[in-house]
Image: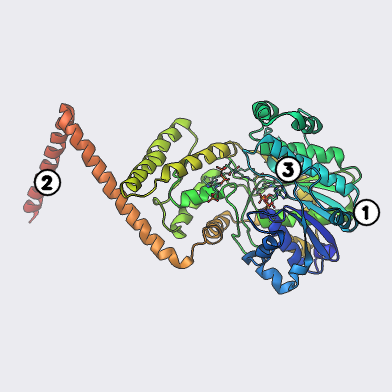
Amino acid sequence: MSGISAFYGGKSILITGATGFMGKVLMEKLLRTSPDLKVIYILVRPKAGQTLQQRIFQILNSKLFEKVKEVCPNVHEKIRVIYADLSQNDLSISLEDMQELLSCTNIVFHCAATVRFDDHLRHAVQLNVIATQQLLLMANQMTKLEAFIHISTAFSNCNLNHIDEVIYPCPVEPKKIIDSMEWLDDSIIEEITPKLIGDQPNTYTYTKALAEMVVQQESGNLNMAIIRPSIVGPTWQEPFPGWIDNTNGPTGFIIAAGKGFLRFIRATPMAVADVVPVDTVINLVLAVGWYTAVHRPKSTLIYHCTSGNMNPCNWGKMDFWLNTTFEKIPFERAFRRPHVEIASNRFTIKYWNAVSHWAPAIIYDFYLRLTGRKPRMTKLMNRILRTISMLEYFLNRSWEWSTYNTEMLMFKLSPQDQKVFNFDMRQLNWIEYIENYVLGVKIYLLKEDMAGIPEARQHFKRLRNIRYLFNTALFLIVWRLLVARSQMARNVWFFIVSFCYKFLSYFRASSTLKA
Ligand SMILES: CCCCCCCCCCCCCCCCCC(=O)SCCNC(=O)CCNC(=O)[C@H](O)C(C)(C)COP(=O)(O)OP(=O)(O)OC[C@H]1O[C@@H](n2cnc3c(N)ncnc32)[C@H](O)[C@@H]1OP(=O)(O)O
Ligand SMILES: NC(=O)C1=CN([C@@H]2O[C@H](COP(=O)(O)OP(=O)(O)OC[C@H]3O[C@@H](n4cnc5c(N)ncnc54)[C@H](OP(=O)(O)O)[C@@H]3O)[C@@H](O)[C@H]2O)C=CC1
C-alpha cells in the first residue's frame, strides 16, 4: 500500500475552501486513496439559497465523486460540515464546533481564498490575510495537530522575475495593513490601493504575499509548509481527464475563443504558459502534508508547483494547439468560426479589436434589434475585453521558479507513492492535455453533448459561407463606391478588365492553335 495513503488513514483532516475548485479535488483524492481516514472537517458557508448540507450533497453526488463511491460507499459519513464564514473576524464557528476542531484535528489544508483580481482590498485582506491569521491562531491551540499546509500562489511574488522557495518581505508589514483596514473607509482604501500594492498587478497577488508573511510570523511551533501553484488547469489524469468547474485563468478565454467571440489576444508567443493540472497540484499537496507531518522539517518549506522549468509550454504553442483542437472538438452554436491569434504589439491588437471584436458585435446587435430582440453582443464583448485587460499582465511575462524542494520531495517518495501521488510535470503531454482541456470545458462547463459534434461542424460550414458572402458583398460595395467617386479607381478597374480580357483571348487563341 502507498505510504502516503496509509498515513492519512485514521486521521481527522480540516479543509478550508473545500467547495472550491482545488478543494473538491483534494477531498476526492483523499477519500479515494485513504477511505479509512477518520473524518474530513470542512468549513463551509451557505450560498446561493442552499444550506450547507445541500451544497455538500450536490458536490458528493457529482461526477467527480463517482469513483470515490466505489471505494468509500459511506462517503457522506466521512465528511463533517462545519458552518464558518472566513470573512468574519472570529470565522463564525460555533463554540462546540471549535472545541471539536481544536481537540481532534491532525492536519489542516488551508485552500480558501478570494481569487478575484479586482476584489476590494478590504475584502481581499479579510479573506486572504486575516482568515489565515485566525486559522493559525486556531492551529496553535490544536492539541493533535501534525501539519498545517497553506496554499498560496506562484504569483505571490510576480513583481520578481526569478522566484526562490523563500518568503519575500512585503514593503508594509501585514499587521499595519490589517490595522489600517479597521479604521479607513472603503473610498480611501480604494484611493490608496495602487500605492499599497506597488508593483504587484492586483489585490489578489498582493494579499497572497501578505498571507505568506503572516504564516512566517505567526506559525509559532507549527509544522508548516506553503505550496505555490502557478495557473491551475483541469485534471490531467485523475479521477478522469479534463475535469474543470470554473472559468478562472485560461478557461474563460478558451470558452470565448471556442465560441468564436475572441479572435485576438495580446500575448507574447514565447512567454511561458505556466499551467499545472489540478490533480498534479493536489498530489503535491498530499505528499507535502505527509512529509511535513512525518519528517518535520526544521523550517517552513515552500514548494513551487509549476511547469515552466521542467516541461515548458508557451502561449504561442498553446494558441496553435487550441485552434487545432477547436476544429476537432467544436463547441455548439459558435458566433464565428473559432480562430484565435496572438500578437504582442498594442497597435495591432487595437486594430483587430476594432475590426474583429467590436465591428461584428455591433453588426450582430443591430441585427438583433432589427429582429425585435434584445442586443447583448457588445455587452459580452465589453466583459471579455475587460477580463483580458486584467489578465494580460500574465500573458506577456515569463517567470522562473526554483523547484529544489519539490524535486527533493519527489525523491523522498517510495516508487508506489510516486505513482499514486504523481506530481512530475515532465510526463505531461501538452497536446493531449490541451485536447482534454477543451473536451472538459465542453462537457463539464458548457454541458454540451458529444452527439452534437456533427451539427457543430455543419454550423462551422454555414459560418464560413456567411463569411465568404459577407466579404464578397463588402468588397463589391466598397468597390462600387470607389468607382463612382474616384478616377484612379476607374482606371484600375479598366486596367484589370482589359488585362483579364487579353489573357482570356490569348488563352483561347493558343488552345485553338494546339487543336
Ligand atoms: C493564447 C491562447 C488564448 C487562450 C488562453 C489565454 C488566457 C490565459 C490567461 C491566463 C492568466 C491567468 C493568470 C492567473 C495567475 C494567477 C493564478 C492564481 O493564483 S489565482 C486563480 C486565478 N484567478 C482568476 O483567474 C480570477 C480571474 N478573474 C477575475 O478576477 C474576474 O473574473 C474578473 C475580474 C476578471 C471579471 O469579473 P466580472 O466581470 O465581475 O466577471 P465574473 O467573474 O463575475 O464572471 C461573470 C461571467 O463571466 C464569466 N467569466 C469569468 N471569467 C471569464 C473569462 N476569463 N472569460 C470569459 N468569461 C469569463 C463567468 O463565468 C461569469 O458567467 P456567468 O456566471 O455570469 O454566466
Ligand atoms: N485556481 C488557480 O489557478 C490557483 C489557485 N491558487 C490558490 O488555491 C486556493 C484554492 O483556489 P481555487 O480552488 O481555485 O479557488 P475557488 O475560488 O474555486 O475556491 C475558493 C474557496 O474558498 C471559499 N471561500 C471564499 N470565501 C469564503 C468565506 N467567506 N467563507 C468560507 N469560505 C470561503 C469558497 O467557498 P464558496 O464555495 O462558499 O465560495 C471556495 O470553497 C486559493 O488559495 C488560491 O489562492 C493558487 C494558484 C492558482
Is residue 198 found left or right of 316 in the rendered image?
Answer: right
- Residue linked to disc 3: 127
Q: Position of residue 484 (x, y in %)?
A: 15, 32
For the residues labelled 1 and 2, say whether their Cβ atoms are less than 8 Å apart.
no
Residue pointed to by mark 2: 504
Q: State the residue at coordinates (30%, 51%).
A: 466
**Does the residue tagged 3 have its C-beta within 8 Å of any atom of ligand 2?**
yes
**Colour pattern:** rainbow
Which residue is drawn at the image coordinates 70% and 28% (left, top)?
196
- On the image, the x and y values in percent for residue 54 come to 68, 62
Side of 269 where 493 appears, left or right: left
Mark pair 1, 3: CA separation:
25 Å
Q: Quadrant of the C terminus?
A: bottom left
Pinpoint residue 390: horizontal percent, then vertical percent. Answer: 57, 37
> How dense is the environment of label 2, judged by Cα within 10 Å: few (below 14), some, or many (20 and up)?
few
**Placement of 346 over or under 37, stated as above or below:** above
Q: Is residue 152 left or right of residue 464?
A: right
Give the residue pinned by disc 1.
143
Identify which amino acid the numbered label 2 is placed on: Leu
Of 193 and 279, nearer the camera is: 193
Indicate the amino acid at tag 1.
Thr
Q: Secondary structure at mark 3?
A: helix
